[in-house]
Image (tube, rainbow, N blue to C red):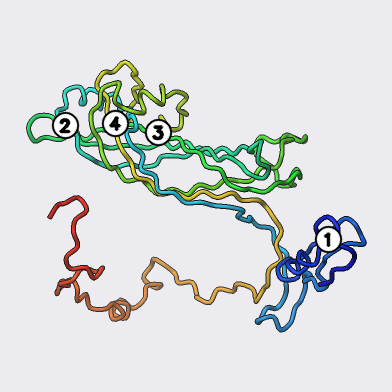
Amino acid sequence: MLCSGTPIFGCGIDWCERIRRGCRTFQYLNRRYSCFMADKVAAGPVGGANGAREAVCIHTKKIYSSCRDKDCIEDLRFYPTATAQSVLSTAQGLRGGSAELIYTFVDVEPVNFNRGYYTVDMHFFYRITLQALNGSTRYTEIEGLATFDKRVVLFGSESGAKIYSSVPEANAIDMPLNLTANLPTAVVEVVDPMLLCAHFADNCNCRCGCERGTLSGVPAGILEAFNEPILFDESAIRRVCVSLGQFSTVRLERDTQLLIPVYDYCIPSNECTLAGGDCSCEDPCRVFDAVEFPMDDFFPPAVPSGGCCNCACPCGEK
């Protein structure tokens, strides 16, 4: 790597020293003052590079930024089904059940005052299953809907290119439809949340019913996930609020071309075995011989698998 010329625009000796240590390609628009890399790897056969046979240019997704989160979502409004509402009207108590993530709507918008950064808005829809106490000891299972909105800001770089492809798209016509800026793709990964708490609340104590306003515009596909209609009665005096614990990751990706080393083609090493039929069945005794004796089933271990003998219950139970 060379650096020549009189320092200009802050490109002094110290700057070039940093370029020598880290950068791959750096060149000023001024031809007299430039810092650049002399040797650049190109696509094609290579030799002696840790066993790599060639360098190949591929088209893939590059992750520009990502984050993970552990959300404790308190007092979400529980919107019951018609049957669940009739059960709740006479219920004497509630106990926890389960929570299932039905779908997540994701939207990406650029941050106007910070170039290269984007807001990722997420709208989560959950199926909540609770146990309502009717009578002295009888519990009835009820279902309902809960929602949660979340926003994060991540770096997704910039690109002014408009991407078109010869692969036909659904409902596409022979004219450019997407004339907007090339936005990054947001990917959200979520596991089903944990149901932490469920309780009755009047219409002034439930945070989601007062501070977040009325729920509206629920997509038809979400409502079809339930066997009964969901009731969005804002005048109901007796409401139910739930608290959830959720783990999630969010990342911003862009299409890019990368040069990677290639060692060989991926050739399957295992042979395919047929399934079904008398002739394709392996020797059952040979298969059974490969199964180890289940010692733990006959002799239960005295110590838990985690190695903790006197672990305290986080809920205070014994």
The amino acid pointed to by label 4 is Cys
Where 21 falls versus 146 (above or below)?
below
* Disc 1 residue type (three-letter): Gln
Q: Earlier in the sequence, mark 1 or mark 2?
A: 1
Which of pointers 4 and 3 indicates the residue nearer the eye?
Answer: 4
Viewer-side label of 3, 1: 1
Circle 2 residue: 93
Between the C-alphas of marks 4 and 3, the distance is 11 Å
Q: Residue furthest right?
A: 32
User: Circle 1 is placed at which residue position?
Assistant: 27
**Disc 3, SS:** strand
- The residue depicted at 55 percent of the width and 50 percent of the height is 251
Could you tell me which quadrant the C terminus lies in?
bottom left
Please tell me whether mark 1 or mark 2 is closer to you in this view. Answer: 1
- The residue indicated by pointer 4 is 241
Mark 2 closeness class: few <14, some 14–19, many ≥20 residues within 10 Å: some
Label 2 with label 4: CB-CB less than 8 Å: no
Local secondary structure at mark 2: strand
Q: At which x and y percent is residue 141?
A: 22, 35
Residue highlighted by disc 3: 147
Q: Position of residue 209 (x, y in %)?
A: 35, 24
**Cα gap from disc 2 to disc 4, whole angstroms:** 13 Å
